[in-house]
Image (tube, rainbow, N blue to C red):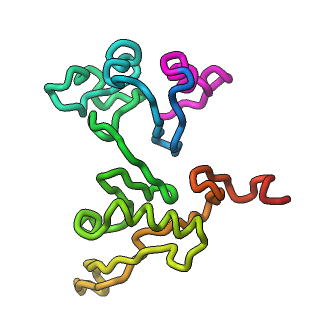
Amino acid sequence: MRVKSRNEFERQFWKLLVNSVYGKCMENVRKHTDSLVYEIRTSNFFDDIKRQLFSYFDTSNYPKNHYCSNDRRKNQPGYFKDELKSEILLEFITLRPKLYAYKTNKDGGVKKYVINNHMKFDEYFNILNAYINNSASQQLCKFMNFIQSKHHFVYSKPIDKIALSANDDKRIIMRDGINTIAYGHYCLKK
């Protein structure tokens, strides 16, 4: 359960902790309610975890033969967990909340077989570039089947669903294609 911070130190804790280890060699790439993505320039991130950050991480999802693997903090709240299970992240594209890709794709609301068989990492990149350049094709639709029930009658229904789109209803992507600002931001009122 998330606890409300009581002072500025608690609000800035993770930033202060990581800056003390990495200094100017890290950059916040993406921040969401329950996740962070950082670009960190270091020779070996896992050595850094083992030596300096281990007490802040739940590494129970790492392979058992990994030298940072430890089940001591398994499923305990308040610890950071590596979503990639010790794999190294090489490229990352986010189009909007819950719609991102990194060599292995994830997408909320789209069937897993469509993601695995029909969506490629380059498609995320192309959608983002089309959005930045104001091209006409700013979204990608994929055909999929759903099972539905109506009046106790179960049937299969084919639909064409928007699988990729950079149109975010909460944020605007800036011209650099990297940074975003929220709708209603004072810069937009000028």
Name the quadrant containing residue 45.
Answer: top left
Hey, which residue is sitting farthest left in the picture?
Answer: 65
Hey, which residue is sitting farthest right in the picture?
Answer: 190
The answer to whether residue 10 is left or right of residue 156 is right
The answer to whether residue 174 is left or right of residue 138 is right
**The C terminus appears in which quarter of the rendering?**
bottom right
Name the quadrant containing residue 133.
Answer: bottom right
For image coordinates 28% across by 81% down, the residue present is 149
Question: Can residue 42 be seen here?
Answer: yes
For residue 30: magenta?
A: no
Residue 166 point in image, percent of width and height: 52, 65
For image coordinates 40% across by 77% down, the residue present is 141
Residue 93 point in image, percent of width and height: 45, 53
Residue segment shown in magenta: 1-22
Residue 142 point in image, percent of width and height: 34, 77
| Main secondary-structure element of the magenta-colored stretch | helix
Residue 139 point in image, percent of width and height: 47, 74
Name the quadrant containing residue 41.
Answer: top left
